[in-house]
Amino acid sequence: MDIAAMATSLKAASLGTAVSLAVTKKAMDTQKEAGAQMMELLEKSVQPHLGNRIDIRA
């Protein structure tokens, strides 16, 4: 294998790794945002006045 072909294949492998890493980072950022939105929704849904008393009458 000559040097030019080796350099080309190494560059292609490097580019593939960089693209894969960028896609993974984007997916992680998207999931982090989705998790933050879910936590915000859960905090808003809490109603502290519900469930404090139990009415037990027979």
Image (tube, rainbow, N blue to C red):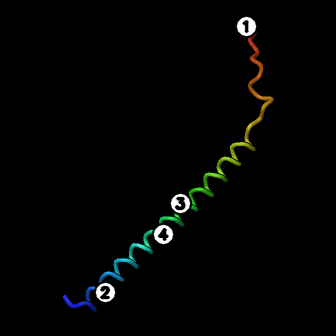
> Which residue was labeled with disc 2?
7
Q: Which mark is residue 23?
A: 4
Tag nearer the camera, 2 or 4? 2
Q: In screen coordinates, is 22 left or right of 35? A: left
Residue located 19% across and 88% down the image: 1
C-alpha separation, residue under disc 1 versus residue under disc 3: 54 Å
Q: Are marks 3 and 2 in contact (CB under 8 Å)?
A: no
Pointer 1 or 3: first along the chain: 3
Q: Residue furthest top?
A: 58
Label 4: few (<14), some or many (≥20) within 10 Å?
Answer: few
Q: Earlier in the sequence, mark 3 or mark 4?
A: 4
Question: Where is mark 1, residue-wise?
Answer: 58
Apparent side of residue 15 relative to residue 34 in the rendered image (left or right): left
Q: Of the residues shown, which amino acid type is indicated by label 3? A: Met
Q: Quadrant location of residue 42?
A: top right
Secondary structure state at the residue bearing disc 3: helix
Q: Label 1 sits on what residue type?
A: Ala
Q: Amino acid at mark 4?
A: Val
Residue wearing tag 3? 28
Disc 3 packing (10 Å; few <14; some 14–19; many ≥20): few
Q: CA distance from mark 2 to mark 1?
A: 84 Å
The numbered mark, 1 or 4, whose residue comes first in the sequence reads 4
The amino acid type of the residue labelled 2 equals Ala
Residue furthest front as drawn: 3
Task: From the top left corner, tell me how far across and down residue 53 is, in percent.
Answer: 77, 19
Instruction: Quote the CA–CA distance across marks 3 and 4.
Output: 9 Å
Determine whether label 2 and label 1 are within 8 Å by CB. Answer: no
Q: Secondary structure at mark 1?
A: loop
Q: Which mark is residue 2?
A: none
Indicate left or right for 39 with 25 as reference.
Answer: right
Q: Nearer the viewer, mark 3 or mark 2?
A: 2
Numbered disc in front, either 1 or 4? 4
